[in-house]
Each structure stands twice: as C-alpha cells, then as structure tokens.
Image (spheres, coloured by chain):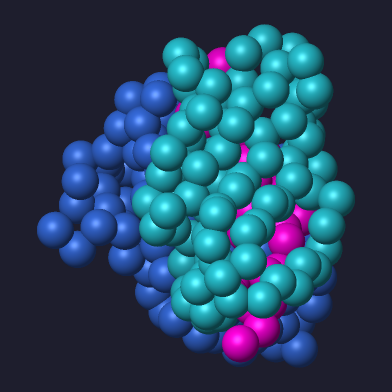
Chain colours: A blue, B cyan
C-alpha cells in the first residue's frame, strides 16, 4: 500500500491564482481530512469528509473548497490564492470513529 | 469546542536524560488523546493514543503517556532520550467523541544535546 499520497510536494502561486492540491489513499478509509500547518500554531483542520459525497467544514475553511466523489480521493481547491494561505498542507485518512489517522507527506505552498 | 495547550515551546535535554512534555486539554467528555512526532520536513507519525482503560499508555520508540482526568493532562515521557528523538512533538484531542477532527496543540520543539 502507498498509504496517503499528496501532490505536488512544493508549489509557488501568485496572488489570485487557483490550484488544486491532490490527496489520495489506498486503504479504503471512509474518513479523510485536510489540515494546514503554520509556525507556532500546530495543525488546524480545514475540511473533512466522512464518505463519498459528504464533506464538512473544519476550523479554518475560508478560501478553500473540497469535494469527495470517490473513496480514494479528496482534493483541496484554492479558488483565489492569497499570501495568508502560504502554509504546509497535510491530508489524512482513517477508518472508523476510533481509527488512527494516517498523514500524507505534505504540500508546501507559497503564495507571493 | 475542544482545545489543547502545550505550554513549552522549546525544550532542551541532554542525551540519556529523562524527558517529559506537557499537554493540557479541554474537552467535555472522555477525550480521544494523541501524541504525534514530526521530524524536519516530514509528515506526522503517531507515537501513542488514549481512548479508554489503563491511563498509562505505551507507544513506539520507548515513549509513554499518562492520562490524568483530574488535571486534564496527557503528558508524554521517556526515561532516556536519544539524539534521534530531536523533533517537534504535537499533542492532539479528537472531536465529536471520536478520533476524528483533531485539534492540535502548538507543538514542543525538542533539542537533544550530545
């Protein structure tokens, strides 16, 4: 199993550009989520999904969209990038309400 | 809403010394608690978790943590630190009575002196 994969590893955007961060898992986990990590703030939940077709907002959802059309994939879309979205983004997945969350390697995004 | 506080931003210990990293949480019911470790430029690795039962939990790499409900704490300990333990450590609590929707503390950076 590849586990949780994220692409790209690094990305530089200009303010106002849009892009999609990809996340995929091959463990048949129904729960997937996106976090952002900023210095001194730990990780903060952006959006999560409890299954295909079901998504919900986390702590910091503004400026981000998600969709879940398959169990395996959970892309995160930035509609109009802002410098405040410069961060490291982590995707995670788990099975069941008590299952361990497995994290991807992260995407480092810089918005200039 | 739940919250997690890690009061120590940075801790320095000598190799072979004991370690304790502090974590305090706020949650209305019995929490799902976690400790993760992150090496530079890497993702997060789960060290240990507490859901219920024995309040002293053992994890990987020789780490353990003790859940103390009366103090709302879940401190991480290791009796003898190795240089490879240098990393950032995060405490987290699950939301909605589950292991999902984690709320993380701000992290503790551990430096290990030779």
Q: Specify whether residue A44 is in view.
A: no
For the C terminus of chain B, give its image quadrant: bottom right
x, y percent for residue A72: 26, 48
Is residue B7 positioned above or below B75 on the image? below
View extreme (right): residue = B7
Q: Residue drawn at (59%, 76%), measured in percent from left and top?
A: B15
- Residue that extends furthest to the top in the rendered view of this protein: B29
Q: Is residue B99 left or right of residue B10?
A: left
Marker count (numbered): 0
The residue that appears at 55% across and 54% down in the rendered structure is B79
Q: Where is residue B75 shown, x and y percent of the image?
A: 67, 40
Is B11 one of the magenta-colored residues?
no
Please say if A2 is above or below A59: below
- Is residue A86 in view from this perspective? yes
The outermost residue toward the left is: A1
Q: Is residue B104 or residue B16 the one in the foreground? A: B16
On screen, residue A3 above or below B31: below
Estimate the x, y position of residue A51 in percent, counting from the top left: 35, 31
| Residue at image point 31% right, 32% down | A95
Q: Going 61% across and 21% down the picture, which residue do you hit?
A: B31
Residue B110 percent coordinates (x, y): 68, 70
The residue nearer to you, when weighing B113 against B94, is B113
Looking at this view, is A66 or B71 the one in front? B71
Residue B94 part of the magenta-drawn span: yes
Query: Is residue B13 rendered to the left or right of residue A106?
Result: right
Residue A4 located left or right of residue A18: left
Q: Which residues are magenta?
A: B86-114
Q: Quadrant of residue B72?
A: top right
């Amino acid at each position: 199993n590849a586990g949780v994969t994220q692409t790209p590893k690094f990305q530089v955007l200009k303010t106002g550009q849009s892009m999609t961060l990809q996340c995929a898992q091959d463990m048949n986990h129904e729960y997937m989520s996106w976090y952002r990590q900023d210095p001194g703030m730990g990780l903060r939940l952006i959006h999560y999904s409890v299954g295909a077709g079901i998504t919900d907002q986390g702590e910091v959802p503004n400026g981000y969209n998600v969709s879940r059309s398959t169990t395996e994939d959970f892309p995160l879309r930035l509609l109009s990038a802002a410098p405040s979205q410069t961060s490291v983004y982590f995707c995670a997945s788990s099975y069941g309400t008590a299952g361990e969350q497995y994290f991807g390697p992260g995407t480092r995004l810089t918005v200039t | 809403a739940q919250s997690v506080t890690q009061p120590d931003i940075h801790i320095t210990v000598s190799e072979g010394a004991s370690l304790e990293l502090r974590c305090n949480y706020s949650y209305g019911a019995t929490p799902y608690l976690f400790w993760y470790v992150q090496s530079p430029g890497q993702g997060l690795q789960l060290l240990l978790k507490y859901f219920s039962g024995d309040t002293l939990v053992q994890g990987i790499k020789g780490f353990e943590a003790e859940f103390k409900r009366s103090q709302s704490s879940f401190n991480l300990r290791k009796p003898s630190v190795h240089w490879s333990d240098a990393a950032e450590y995060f405490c987290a609590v699950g939301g909605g009575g589950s292991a999902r929707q984690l709320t993380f503390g701000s992290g503790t950076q551990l430096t290990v002196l030779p």
